[in-house]
Image (cartoon, rainbow, N blue to C red):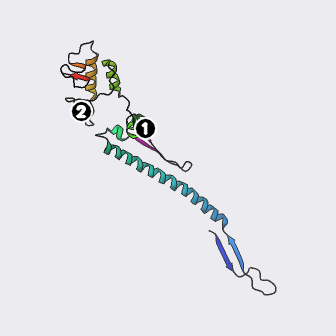
């Protein structure tokens, strides 16, 4: 600790005049305290940045739950936080690569990528249609998506060598206003 001392002179002058002496000491200890405080400040800053980033990540996940209709856990937990540290005082909040395909069109706008089953249906159905939406009579899971079993069943029906007894692609006969799609009986 630094001490400033004001007091009687350590060496009196020979003529008897009064003299004031000021002595400053403890600079080495002060420097150690300042250095330690600097380290603590960097640590506190890194910890604060990381906690703030984590809170923002949680808020983004809450926003996904509030915005999307029955989002899957995969989509809800699509964000990550890279913590700050004392050598790099930067915390990063990002979107995980796999979830970015789903989330980015909703965040920055634009068309979403085709889902894997949509790509397969386009290839199997030999149509130019891209996005496929489940119609009436399709069972949906808790997140509002078609089950993998149903997708496989439809794809197998389309793969049969030209036999579309139960499933066909196009507009149903006699219903010119109906949308083009995959129809089943």
Q: Residue at x 37, y 38 (%)?
A: 106
Q: Which residue position is annotated with label 1? A: 96
Q: Position of residue 147 (x, y in %)?
A: 26, 29
Looking at the image, is mark 1 or mark 2 earlier in the sequence?
1
Nearer-the-camera pick, 65 or 114: 114
The magenta segment: 79-94
Secondary structure found at label 2: loop
As for residue 88 lying within the magenta part, the answer is: yes
| Quadrant of the image containing the C terminus | top left
| Quarter where residue 171 is shown | top left
In this rendering, position of residue 53 left or right of residue 35 = left
In this rendering, position of residue 25 left or right of residue 65 = right
Q: Which residue position is annotated with label 2? A: 140
Q: Position of residue 74 (x, y in %)?
A: 35, 37
Q: Residue at x 79, y 83 (%)?
A: 13
Any mark on residue 126, and which?
A: none
């Amino acid at each position: 600790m630094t001490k400033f001392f004001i007091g009687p002179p350590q060496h009196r002058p020979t003529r008897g005049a009064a003299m004031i002496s000021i002595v400053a000491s403890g600079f080495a200890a002060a420097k150690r305290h300042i250095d330690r405080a600097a380290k603590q400040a960097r640590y506190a800053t890194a910890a604060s940045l990381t906690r703030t980033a984590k809170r923002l990540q949680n808020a983004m996940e809450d926003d996904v739950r509030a915005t999307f209709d029955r989002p899957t856990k995969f989509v809800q937990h699509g964000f990550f936080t890279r913590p700050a540290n004392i050598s790099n005082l930067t915390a990063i909040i990002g979107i995980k690569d796999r979830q970015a395909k789903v989330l980015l069109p909703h965040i920055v706008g634009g068309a979403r990528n085709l889902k894997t089953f949509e790509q397969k249906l386009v290839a199997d159905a030999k149509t130019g249609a891209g996005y496929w939406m489940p119609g009436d009579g399709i069972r949906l899971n808790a997140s509002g998506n078609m089950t993998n079993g149903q997708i496989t069943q439809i794809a197998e029906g389309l793969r049969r060598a030209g036999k579309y007894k139960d499933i066909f692609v196009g507009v149903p006969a006699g219903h010119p206003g109906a949308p083009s799609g995959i129809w089943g009986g």
